[in-house]
Image (cartoon, helix red, strand yellow):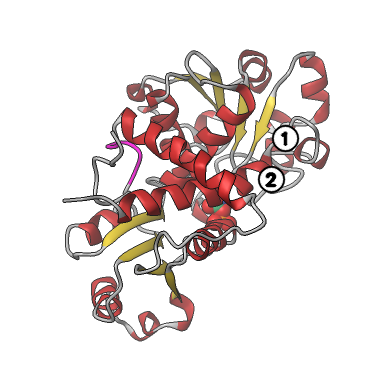
Amino acid sequence: MSQLSTKHLIGIEHLSVQDVQLILETATQFKEIINRPIKKVPTLRDITIANLFFENSTRTRISFELAQKRLSADVINFTSSSSSVKKGETLLDTVNNILSMKVDMIVMRHSSPGAAHYLAERVQAQIVNAGDGTHEHPTQALLDAYSMQEKIGDLTGKKIAIIGDIMHSRVALSNIFCLQKLGAEVTLCGPPTLIPKDIHRLDVQVSYNIDEALKWCDVANVLRIQLERQNTKYFPSLREYALYYGVNKQRLDKLQKEIVIMHPGPINRGVELTSDVADSEHSIILEQVENGVAVRMAVMYLLANKQD
Ligand code: CP
């Protein structure tokens, strides 16, 4: 199979296992290309892509733009803070106006869960979800899985701990779906207040003890405490969070085993990860960012080449 089963990338949940494998295999080919002296290919020369970011982003926005430029697509960047959204224009009106300028694909980040799905139901262009509220961040999960495979091989039977603010994280949900499709076991770890009560329905294990979770896993994907999404106090203080759930060098030294540490960024240094872990030989955080370009090239290439 050389085609995706879907016209849009809204989330990992509804991708098939073959879709995920196809994206990861295609990313390997693009990674080889972007490490050549001439990094650019003409693959999307006739395609125009608009990046619509209604929420802040550093990594994802730059990574998508670089991926589009490496594929020779025409690129338009839109940030809501300097747009007519500020004058009261609706999401659909904004997008329809942009599409009337002959745009083929929309990459969108939005604070509302379901925003990408809402657009996909209403416009002709292909939609790529670059993060919708607390729902999904599919390309982050794909680049995470790619980076894990690169580091520890086939993920079948591998043990992955996702640690931190599960409740407010779109990365956690997309990672769970992606890792399970690739055959990995997933344990979620964090304070009880930051783990949704019905999460067991997703067939994951839950631990409230970080030392046990670290001892169990091959890879720890550590998530940011999303203070901007917390409208109540979920733990007494950041100092206490770091004490009970922060990944630090003392915790890793006690394990006396190989462990891979990941983080989607941006990091709250000294809270979920100390600097001596984030910058250590265990960490593949910058490899994740590097792989994001190849994975996003693969996603946009496969979507653009999808036949109806
Ligand atoms: N990982 C991630 O989505 O980072 P940004 O918010 O900087 O895009």
Left or right of 290 on screen, residue 52? left
Question: CA gap, disc 2 to disc 1?
Answer: 8 Å
Residue 135: x and y in percent read 37, 46
Q: Which residue is mark 2?
A: 286
Q: Does residue 242 show up magenta in the picture?
A: no
What span is in magenta? 11-15
Amino acid type indicated by mark 2: Leu
Residues at marks 2 and 1 touching, judged by CB atoms closer than 8 Å: yes
Decide if residue 225 is in sight here: no
Q: Which mark is residue 291?
A: none
| Above or below: residue 147 compared with residue 233 | above
Amino acid type indicated by mark 1: Ser
Decide if residue 87 is in sight here: yes
Q: Secondary structure at mark 2?
A: helix
Q: Name the quadrant containing residue 121.
A: bottom left
Question: Within 10 Å of the Cα at label 2, are there few (<14), some (14-19), or many (20+) other Cα atoms?
Answer: some
Q: Which residue is mark 1?
A: 283
Q: How many marks?
A: 2
Residue 22: x and y in percent read 38, 35
**In front of the other: 294 or 138:** 294
Q: Secondary structure at mark 1?
A: loop
Give the quarter the ligand 1 occupies. bottom right
Question: Within 10 Å of the Cα at label 1, are there few (<14), some (14-19), or many (20+) other Cα atoms?
Answer: many
- Quadrant (top left, top right, bottom left, bottom right) of the N terminus: top left
| Above or below: residue 49 compared with residue 1 | below
Q: Name the quadrant containing residue 58.
A: bottom right
| Above or below: residue 130 compared with residue 191 | below
Instruction: Please give the name of the residue rendered at 30% of the width and 73% of the height, measured from the top-left corner.
Output: 103
**In front of the other: 269 or 167:** 269
Left or right of 165 on screen, residue 2? left
Left or right of 254 on screen, residue 303? left
